[in-house]
C-alpha cells in the first residue's frame, strides 16, 4: 500500500500529462483537426503524406542537419577536452568541475535572451559588437541576415555554453573508471601524450563516447528554445533556420492551428529520432557485453 501511496501520484501525473497527450496526438494525426483538438474528418495517412511533401517541413529537417553538423562534433570534442583537463587537475578540481557544470542549471530561455539582447544584439551596445569596435570593425547584424548566416554563431555558442558541462561530467565519470595501472604500464613503456590518449583513454571511453553521441544527436533533433527565443522578434519568426520543432509549433499553434498535420509531423519526427538512435547504437555497438 505504501508503495502506491508514494509512487501513485507520479504515475497518475505521468499518465495524464505524458502518455494520454502522446496517444491523443497519434490519434489526431489521422484526422482533419483545425482550431480544435477534437477529431473531425478521418483522412487516414493523408496528413503524413502532406507533411512529407511539404517543402517547409523538409527544409526544417535540413536545418536540423546543419545544426547537428555543427553542434554534435564541437560539443563532443570540447566536453572531452574539458573533462581531460579537469581530470588532470590536482588543485581545486571540485571547483573547476562545478564552474563548468554550472551553466547546465541555467534555463535555455534565459540563456537565449542573454545571447540575443546582451551579447549579439546587433547594435553597438552588444558585447560582441563592442569588442569588434575596439578593433575598428563595423557592427554586425548577427540575427538579421541570412547571408552570411551569422545567426548560426549565436545559436551554436549558446547551446555549447549550456551543455558542455553536462557531457563533461559523463566523460569524467568514464575517465575515473579507467584503471591507473594502464597509464602506469604506458609510462613504463615510454608512451605519453597523444599515444596514451589514442591507445588507452579513447578505447576505454568507447561506451561513454557512444552514449554522448547518441544524446547529442537526440538533443539536436529537439532543439527549440534557442531557435525560437533568439530568432523570433515581436511575435514573428524569420523564414530561415526553422528546426522541426519550431516548424511544428507554428503549424499546430499558429494562425491556422492545424493539429492534424502538426501531430503527423510530430509522429514523423519521433520515428526519425527512434530510427537514428537505434541505428547509431547498433552501428557503434552500444550495449555490448562489457560496456
Image (cartoon, rainbow, N blue to C red):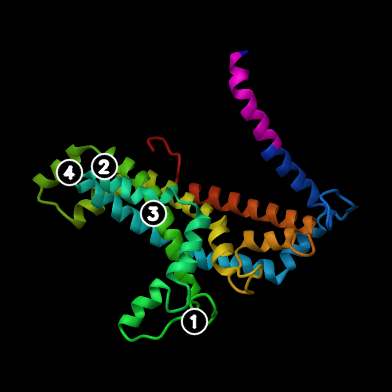
Residue at point 50%, 73% (across, down)? 151
Crowd around label 3: few <14 · some 14–19 · many ≥20 (10 Å): many
Crowd around label 4: few <14 · some 14–19 · many ≥20 (10 Å): some
Element class at badge 2: helix
Disc 1 from disc 4: Cα separation: 47 Å
Residue 233, quarter of the rendered image? bottom right
The mark found on residue 148 in the picture is 1
Q: Nearer the viewer, mark 2 or mark 1?
A: 2
Disc 1 from disc 3: Cα separation: 26 Å
Q: Is residue 106 something that shows in the picture?
A: yes
Element class at badge 4: helix
Residue 249, quarter of the rendered image? bottom right
Instruction: Look at the image and tell me in which quarter the C terminus lies.
Output: top left
Q: Which residue is mark 4?
A: 183
Crowd around label 2: few <14 · some 14–19 · many ≥20 (10 Å): few
The mark found on residue 15 in the picture is none
The mark found on residue 94 in the picture is 2
Q: Is residue 70 something that shows in the picture?
A: no
Mark nearer the N terminus (2 vs 3) = 2
Mark nearer the N terminus (4 vs 3) = 3
Residue at point 80%, 64% (across, down)? 256
Q: Nearer the viewer, mark 2 or mark 4?
A: 2
Amino acid at each position: 500500500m505504501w508503495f502506491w501511496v508514494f509512487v501513485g501520484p507520479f504515475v497518475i501525473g505521468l499518465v495524464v500529462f505524458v502518455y494520454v497527450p502522446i496517444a491523443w496526438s497519434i490519434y489526431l494525426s489521422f484526422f482533419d483537426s483545425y482550431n480544435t483538438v477534437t477529431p473531425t474528418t478521418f483522412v487516414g495517412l493523408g496528413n503524413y503524406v502532406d507533411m512529407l511533401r511539404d517543402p517547409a517541413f523538409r527544409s526544417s529537417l535540413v536545418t536540423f542537419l546543419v545544426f547537428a553538423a555543427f553542434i554534435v562534433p564541437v560539443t563532443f570534442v570540447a566536453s572531452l577536452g574539458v573533462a581531460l583537463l579537469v581530470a588532470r587537475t590536482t588543485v581545486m578540481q571540485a571547483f573547476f568541475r562545478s564552474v563548468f557544470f554550472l551553466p547546465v542549471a541555467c534555463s535555455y530561455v534565459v540563456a537565449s535572451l542573454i545571447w540575443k539582447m546582451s551579447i549579439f544584439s546587433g547594435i553597438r551596445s552588444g558585447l560582441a559588437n563592442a569588442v569588434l569596435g575596439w578593433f575598428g570593425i563595423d557592427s554586425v547584424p548577427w540575427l538579421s541576415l541570412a547571408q552570411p548566416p551569422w545567426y548560426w554563431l549565436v545559436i551554436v555558442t549558446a547551446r555549447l555554453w549550456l551543455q558542455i558541462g553536462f557531457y563533461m561530467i559523463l566523460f569524467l565519470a568514464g575517465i575515473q573508471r579507467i584503471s591507473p595501472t594502464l597509464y602506469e604500464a604506458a609510462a613504463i613503456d615510454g608512451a605519453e601524450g597523444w599515444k596514451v590518449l589514442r591507445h588507452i583513454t579513447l578505447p576505454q571511453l568507447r561506451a561513454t563516447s557512444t552514449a554522448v553521441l547518441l544524446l547529442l544527436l537526440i538533443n539536436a533533433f529537439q532543439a527549440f528554445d534557442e531557435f525560437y527565443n533568439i530568432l523570433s522578434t515581436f511575435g514573428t519568426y524569420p523564414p530561415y533556420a526553422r528546426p522541426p520543432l519550431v516548424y511544428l509549433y507554428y503549424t499546430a499553434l499558429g494562425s491556422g492551428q492545424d493539429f492534424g498535420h502538426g501531430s503527423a509531423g510530430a509522429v514523423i519526427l519521433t520515428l526519425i529520432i527512434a530510427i537514428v538512435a537505434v541505428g547509431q547504437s547498433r552501428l557503434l555497438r552500444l550495449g555490448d557485453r562489457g560496456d
